[in-house]
Image (cartoon, rainbow, N blue to C red):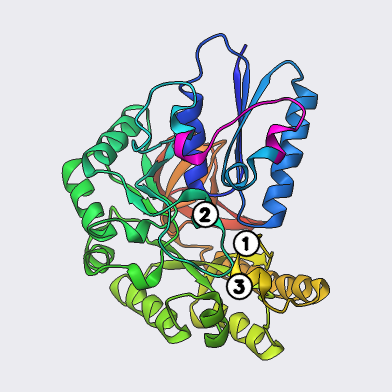
Amino acid sequence: MSVETITLGCRLNFAETETIARTVPPGEDWVVVNSCAVTNEAVRQTRQAIRHAHRERPIADILVTGCAAELDPQSFATMPGVSRVVPNAHKLNSFAANDVMAPAGTHSHVRSFVAVQTGCDHRCTFCSIWQARGPSRSFPFELIRDAVAREIDRGAREIVLTGVDITDYEGGIGKLCQRLLAAEPRLQRLRLSSLDGVEMDEPLFELIGSEPRLLPHFHLSLQAGDDMILKRMKRRHSRADALRTVERIKAARRDATIGADLIAGFPTETEEMALNSLKLLDDCDVVAAHVFPFSPRPNTPAARMPQLPASIVKARAARLRLAAAERRVRWLDSLIGTVQPVLVEFGGKGHADNFAPVQVESAQRGDSGTARISGRIGDHLTAVWA
């Protein structure tokens, strides 16, 4: 008897899945599937994962939760092997009477995710996650501090703060980070998950420029590089705003690196508009792009807009991914010969502070220090301890 976890989608899901798994009563045989609904492909992969789990473990009970299950619970409830479909609001007490507003966290990992909020108050026209997660709710500082302490007690060397919209944290994400770093001196490596640039507060920019424990990789929810498309997405920033945010980050910390979420083939997108998003990779110096082909989600305004042919959406996503991959290779190659701080997470592999993936020769899980970058194999660097 055992519990198996299958997680799709965001880092918040990963934190929540492991919190759920810790509450499964001993001796029970469950598969926990935490689903994603950010795209139609994510929903398809969720169904595929459930079917595979049922084939591999036909006797196990399958619990399905997460955003896809929230939006269409009946379709998952009727799948073979599924014993329980749990709404997002109750996922953390699926098996036990836990406080649903307690932050989730991964465990037994060198790099651990801790949730600081859930839900979203914004209404981007392409997104259905606000329907699945509800309004933005921030976890109390004391619970987050205690969750961070527990993860460090379990061996975490790096904490990643995650959520649906962490920059909407009540009181400001920068202020939260300041309080955490002051309250937990053992916290020597702090990362942030995806950020909305228009919500980055002044305390956060102060930390970027002054606090080495806040690691210098910042993943921004940019989505597009054309003002008309951004307006039709109902995003709250312009192209110029995105450039200013990146400029401020890099002015505060010279070694900062930028990641970004980008959507290709949004309804009404012209070739000129698509090229503006393509150019954003260079203009914002993006070295880690998550590119999504537009996927019309049910009951969203974007699904009712004039759609582009699937072939065009696919081609524009491929072009954007290729350009992003070429930029990433150039960036990784530029690090060869440098010395980088690295934390090893598993199998000799880990990440530098700038989030470059690195494999260090003769390194063990949890090792950290400065490593000299000696080469590149595919999408990761090779190194030896300096």
Q: Which residue is mark 2?
A: 131
- Considering only vertical position in the picture, is 83 above or below 129? above
- Considering only vertical position in the picture, is 370 above or below 238? above
Q: Are marks 2 and 1 in contact (CB under 8 Å)?
A: yes
Magenta region: 75-90
Position in image of residue 93 (x %, y %): 44, 28
Nearer to me, 11 or 190: 11
- The residue depicted at 68 percent of the width and 83 percent of the height is 268
Nearer to me, 259 or 376: 259
Q: Secondary structure at mark 3?
A: helix
Nearer to me, 309 or 212: 309
Query: Label 3: few (<14), some or many (≥20) within 10 Å?
Result: some
Sequence-earlier tag: 2 or 3: 2
Q: Which of the two discs, 1 and 3, sits closer to the camera?
A: 1
Q: Secondary structure at mark 2?
A: helix
The mark tally for this picture is 3
